[in-house]
């Protein structure tokens, strides 16, 4: 693709006879420019997706509750996210007088940056990742665990009671569910024999059902069913979504760590939360739902399958938010530590024995 | 002109040294912890420059992502009196100075002399497709499997010790066993009793 873009540029500037002097200037920095172009190509749809995920959330939950949802701004309310964004953008950012000023403004950045940085290793199609890291899974786990700092620092630096409680809750919750999440991924790594996200998807293309043209039965979600559920539910908890949203539980602590934030600084937390949701959806698709692979043999693989799977997982997130009441805090901790972690600890040897037995399906 | 790698090395080292200094000079303990996080992060970046990507990511994942979060968690809860903390500073300075000088001396001895055989371990040129992670895994589970297992047993003992030390059964806690909550049947809670009406309804009512 890089060569094609370069050729197009060359053809265009040759019309004016300017290509050679331009290329002499830009050749040393071209790799940098190309990476930046790729980053923009990933980030722009992502941020647009975040904006329209909020719209989808309001619409989906609206219909589930026999309402219409946003329908005033633009046709079908489609301009609602833009209106919300403009409103937040032009609002004043208030910094509480007794807060820790620098940290107060640093916290939204710390929440947002890891949520965006992880996208560099996500493969959208075969080879379609910004960085095809061999340690991609580790990179993903490391950066998602860094995301908790934004919430904790926001809670502390606000110097206020509700944000502090929210920060404490999120610290405990995210650390707990990272353990379950990491352990569920260990099983995926065992059968994939790789930490590379692209390889993890490729492994799911092989198997008896894939040979029969029924690829979706060969994806990891069936042979690793309990881990798929553990990962999916931990993902919901990790992103502080309902029914695990005690961090910002409206009925108890108003909006948790975001109480003191306004305008764009508030919007950054919001963006980070939704970017993380989309990320968990993408990762679930990659680890368990076959990424860009087509579910049936006669349809071609491609990025559209990846996007379709991500949308399905995101719909599931919205669905459970509309359906389930909020967990009590001690029950969240119990689910993470006393149900998921032991389940994973049992399942790791089970899959290990399976792989050593003659019934191994991942050769 | 230095190449990009060297320039990056100096940038990251400068940030590391600054962050490490701020850890011990920051008045607010939370700021100190956050500077420690920054120090870990830039150390990870330095390791990436050395092509040790597994170690770098593991450092960020374990220390930044887990250990320091819990550390921050604790420090934020403390009500620290900064005046009292700094009271013994001048009295203990000489001891700290000696220890610091010793550590610097040891590092100089190891890194700059030939007695420790550093020059017999030249930097190895690695191919671009060389996977550090895979190589480490292979070594850990073949040549070093016993030390590795021993380390994991030590960690397991530490985990169990931590659980045992903090475990306490409180009396009078109204804890509900979720398994029993789920297993409850409607017959355990309500009983539908068939009974005759207390009095006969007047004609025309109750239809």
Image (tube, coloured by chain):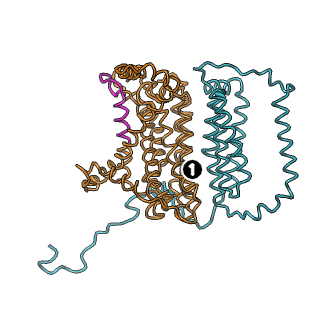
Chain colours: A orange, B cyan
Task: State whether residue A120 is above or below residue B202.
Answer: above
Can residue A223 be spotted in the picture? Answer: no
Residue A353 x %, y %? 55, 29
Give the magenta part as a residue range.
Answer: A294-313
| Total numbered badges shown on the rendered structure | 1
- Answer left or right for B154 relative to B60: right
Instruction: Single out the residue that lies furthest toward the left.
Output: B204
Along the viewing direction, whichever of B125 and A357 lies nearer the viewer: B125
> Dot 1: few (<14), some (14–19), or many (≥20) neighbours within 10 Å?
many
- Looking at the rendering, in which quadrant would you find the C terminus of chain B? bottom left
Along the viewing direction, whichever of B97 and A236 lies nearer the viewer: B97
- Looking at the rendering, in which quadrant would you find the N terminus of chain B? top right
Task: State whether residue A342 is above or below residue B200.
Answer: above
Residue at 37% over, 26% down = A215
- Answer left or right for A17 relative to A346: left
The residue pinned by badge 1 equals: A149
The residue marked by circle 1 belongs to what chain? A
Q: Is residue A13 magenta?
A: no
Residue B39 x %, y %? 67, 43
Can residue A128 be spotted in the picture? Answer: yes
Residue A267 x %, y %? 43, 53
Residue at 64% over, 30% down = B49
Task: State whether residue A159 is above or below residue A313.
Answer: below
Along the viewing direction, whichever of A170 and A118 lies nearer the viewer: A118
Q: Mark 1 falls on what kind of element?
A: helix
Residue B136 x %, y %? 65, 26
């Amino acid at each position: 693709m890089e060569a094609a873009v370069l050729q197009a540029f060359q053809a265009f500037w040759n019309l004016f006879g300017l290509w050679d002097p331009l290329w002499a200037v830009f050749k040393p920095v071209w790799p940098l420019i190309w990476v930046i172009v790729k980053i923009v190509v990933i980030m722009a749809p992502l941020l647009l997706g975040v904006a329209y995920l909020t719209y989808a959330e309001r619409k989906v939950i609206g219909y589930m509750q026999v309402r219409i949802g946003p329908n005033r701004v633009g046709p079908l309310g489609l301009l609602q996210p833009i209106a919300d964004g403009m409103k937040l953008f032009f609002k004043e950012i208030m910094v509480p007088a007794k807060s820790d000023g620098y940290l107060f403004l640093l916290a939204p950045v710390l929440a947002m940056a890891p949520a965006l940085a992880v996208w560099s290793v996500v493969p959208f199609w075969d080879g379609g990742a910004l960085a095809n890291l061999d340690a991609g899974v580790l990179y993903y786990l490391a950066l998602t665990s860094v995301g908790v700092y934004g919430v904790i620092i926001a809670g502390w630096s606000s110097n206020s009671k509700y944000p502090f409680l929210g920060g404490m809750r999120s610290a405990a919750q995210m650390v707990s569910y990272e353990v379950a999440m990491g352990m569920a991924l260990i099983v995926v790594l065992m059968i994939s024999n790789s930490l590379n996200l692209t390889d993890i998807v490729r492994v799911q293309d092989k198997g008896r059902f894939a040979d029969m043209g029924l690829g979706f039965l060969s994806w990891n979600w069936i042979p690793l069913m309990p881990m798929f559920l553990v990962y999916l539910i931990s993902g919901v908890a990790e992103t502080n979504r309902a029914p695990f949203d005690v961090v910002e539980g409206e009925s108890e602590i108003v909006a948790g760590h975001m109480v003191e934030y306004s305008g764009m600084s508030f919007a950054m937390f919001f963006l980070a939360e939704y970017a993380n949701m989309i990320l968990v959806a993408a990762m679930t698709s990659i680890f368990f739902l076959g990424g860009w692979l087509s579910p049936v043999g006669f349809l071609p693989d491609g990025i559209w399958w990846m996007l379709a799977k991500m949308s399905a997982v995101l719909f599931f997130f919205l669905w459970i938010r509309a359906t389930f009441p909020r967990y009590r805090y001690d029950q969240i901790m119990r689910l993470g530590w006393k149900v998921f972690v032991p389940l994973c600890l049992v399942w790791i040897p089970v899959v290990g024995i399976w792989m050593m037995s003659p019934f191994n399906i991942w050769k | 002109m230095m190449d990009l790698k060297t320039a990056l090395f100096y940038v990251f080292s400068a940030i590391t040294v600054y962050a490490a200094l701020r850890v011990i000079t920051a008045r607010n303990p939370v700021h100190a912890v956050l500077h420690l996080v920054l120090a870990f992060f830039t150390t990870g970046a330095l390791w990436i420059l050395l092509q040790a990507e597994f170690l770098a990511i593991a450092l960020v994942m374990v220390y930044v992502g887990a250990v320091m979060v819990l550390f921050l968690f604790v420090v934020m809860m403390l009500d620290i009196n900064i005046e009292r903390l700094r009271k013994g500073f001048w009295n203990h300075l000489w001891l700290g100075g000696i220890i610091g000088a010793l550590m610097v001396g040891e590092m100089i001895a190891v890194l700059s002399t030939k007695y420790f055989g550093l020059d017999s371990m030249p930097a190895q040129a690695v191919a671009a497709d060389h996977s550090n992670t895979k190589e480490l895994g292979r070594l850990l589970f073949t040549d070093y499997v016993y030390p590795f297992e021993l380390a994991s047993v030590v960690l397991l003992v530490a985990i169990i010790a931590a659980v045992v030390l903090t475990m306490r059964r409180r009396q009078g806690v109204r804890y509900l066993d979720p398994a029993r909550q789920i297993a409850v049947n409607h017959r355990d809670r309500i009983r539908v009793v068939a009974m005759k009406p207390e009095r006969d309804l007047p004609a025309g009512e109750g239809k």
